[in-house]
Image: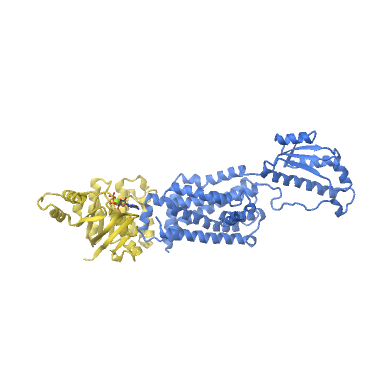
Chain colours: A blue, B yellow
Amino acid sequence: MNGRCVRELVRKEFLQLFRDRRNRPLLIVAPLLQLILFGYVVTTDVRETRLAVVDESRTPLSRSLIEAFAASPAFRLQASAADARSLEEDLLQRRVDLGIHIASDFAVRLTARRPAEVQLLFDGSLSHLTSQRAAAAQAVIEDWNRRLLSLGSEPRSPAGGGIEGRIRTWYNPNLESRPYFVPGIVAFLVMLLSLLFTSLAIVREKEAGTMEQLIVTPLRPVEFLLGKTIPFFLVAQGQMVLVIGFARAWFEVPLAGSAVFLFAASGLFLVCTLGVGLWISTVSRTQQQAVLTTFLFLVPFFLLSGFVFPIERMPLLVRAAARLNPLAHFLVIVRGVFLKGVGPTVLWPSCLALAGIGAIVFGAALLKFRKRPG
Amino acid sequence: MAEAVAVRGLSKRFGRFTAVDGIDLTVQEGEIFGFLGPNGAGKSTTIRMLCGILKPSGGCGRVAGLDLFRDAERIKRRIGYLSQQFSLYDDLTPYENLRLFLGIYRVAPSLWAERIEEAVASVGLRPDLHRIVRGLPPGARQRLALACALLHRPRLLFLDEPTSGVDPLARRAFWEFIGGLTRQGISAFVSTHHLEEADRCGRVALMHEGRIVACGPPRRLVAEVLPERPEAGLEDAFAILLRGRAA
Ligand SMILES: Nc1ncnc2c1ncn2[C@@H]1O[C@H](COP(=O)(O)OP(=O)(O)OP(=O)(O)O)[C@@H](O)[C@H]1O
Ligand SMILES: [Mg+2]
């Protein structure tokens, strides 16, 4: 392998990339715009859940629970429904999202130190929201419970509370979806662009006939592939920095862990995506084919990544397939670093998986390329 | 004299279609070898096999002193190739193209300035050296392609229809340039549709449907085919040769 030869190829690729005016917005503006768009669209935050209450207890205790709900940013007290029937009607008509039914013996049971029940009614037809709202409601009740126990005038024995098992959410205590999604968007965007740019850059040489000219030179396949991948590796890393910086500044998503580690892990991830991009270029003859094939790949990569749909809830076979998905592993890393602030000591299995997948994909693409460059 | 190209039984099949059907060819060192034939005859396919772009389906032989099959990679260092379509980077400048190919051909950087200067002077690219290739006239692009193909000082040049779409004056200059190269002992294997250019060649081969129909110095070919018409040209001779084939 000849270093100078690779350097000249990289130089030429950068010249072409930045000389083409159409590329400039694609390189910088597009990722940021998409981040903003995704950042606002992909959100499952429980905000402004409209709430109606039927309070049959009508005691200071029941009113304090209602106030606790009203004080939470996740809920907005809509109206007090007259009775259970009209509450049901409100839910049905989607005038409210959550109904709370406090039974008449609520205060009586609590003061007698017996467990009291509060009925929470959700609209289950919006299943993805329901679980979030249920969790948020649960959190309000837990909170209220805790205060009741600690502020209660009479000292209580721990056994008498009747509350067991507490849900506490770590790492993203407010269950905000943005810190959860934005790192994923970063990963997805960088994947999209690195796939597209590599496969297009190679297929363009086939279309223009320049590939034929390169084949009659002593240029080695490895040198050619390095010349194609190094520029896009650098560009993608640059985009990574840009997009992450922007996510922190604009969405105020905190980066809890090490940026350096994230950078290194994204290097591994890029080896995988660039390998896939190379592979796509070997099976595509025109740029159109390359774009279509790229999107054919992107959909399963996206669905099986855990970006929106948790992998743990998928059937066994699909879970196994997801294990081969570099995006899935990288998402684990990105979220780990962003939200939990963990590093290689925790995330090494994902890094190892990325390195393995990268070596295999890149190696396979190289072999395929060696056999049939044109 | 040594042979720059010597192949026997060279053939190429694309699926069930035979594009080149067992041809024998020899090109002497310092010779201009003209390669003629109608569209689809198999000229480009032959050239691409000799350059190592396509793997031959059969045959054997040597190119630039190396075995066509075993030394395909080393052959590439000794030959220059100009493809039928312009195939340099048209979004780069001539200078950037030349520099890239200097790197690819592993020319030592200390020689780069000198080689670029030489290339620019020999084909006359100076005014266009730093303009984007896309905006240059076809003649200038062709000269650039030639300069690129010569950067590593090959002993053998394959030129696939180098003069198509180039104006008569530029064509004349081109042939004079090639003539100058062959006087230095460089061989040129040139395909063309312009029969009058055949007179510039030491020998020509006429190809038709994958086979070589006739081969030899142009004057002698005409004399052999039309012995009773001394005023006849290559065109008349080829018309008769191809008609005889078709019948
Ligand atoms: N990659 C390929 N796959 C299938 N057929 C091919 C391929 N390349 C060339 N051919 C066919 O082989 C035949 C010879 O093509 P070739 O390009 O060698 O002709 P040519 O003599 O150069 O013609 P022209 O004067 O038009 O350039 C044509 O019929 C062409 O369609
Ligand atoms: Mg041709």
x and y percentages locating residue B15 in the rendered image: 35, 55
x and y percentages locating residue B227 in the rendered image: 11, 53
x and y percentages locating residue B211 in the rendered image: 25, 56
User: How many numbered badges does the structure rendering display?
Assistant: 0
* Nearer-the-camera pick, B182 or A285: A285
Q: Quadrant of the C terminus of chain A?
A: bottom left
x and y percentages locating residue A194 in the rendered image: 51, 52
- Whether residue A330 is visible: no
Quarter assignment of residue A373 = bottom left
* Nearer-the-camera pick, B5 or B170: B5
Residue A108 lies left or right of residue B18; in this view the side is: right
Question: Is the residue A221 above or below the residue A286 in the image?
Answer: below
Residue A36 lies left or right of residue B56; in this view the side is: right
* Nearer-the-camera pick, A234 or A38: A38
* Nearer-the-camera pick, B53 or A345: B53
Residue lying furthest left: B228
- Whether residue A264 is visible: yes
Q: Quadrant of the N terminus of chain A?
A: bottom left
Residue A203 lies left or right of residue B216; in this view the side is: right
Identify which residue is drawn at 37% across, 47% down: B132
Question: Is the residue A63 above or below the residue A146 in the image?
Answer: above
Residue A291 lies left or right of residue A65; in this view the side is: left
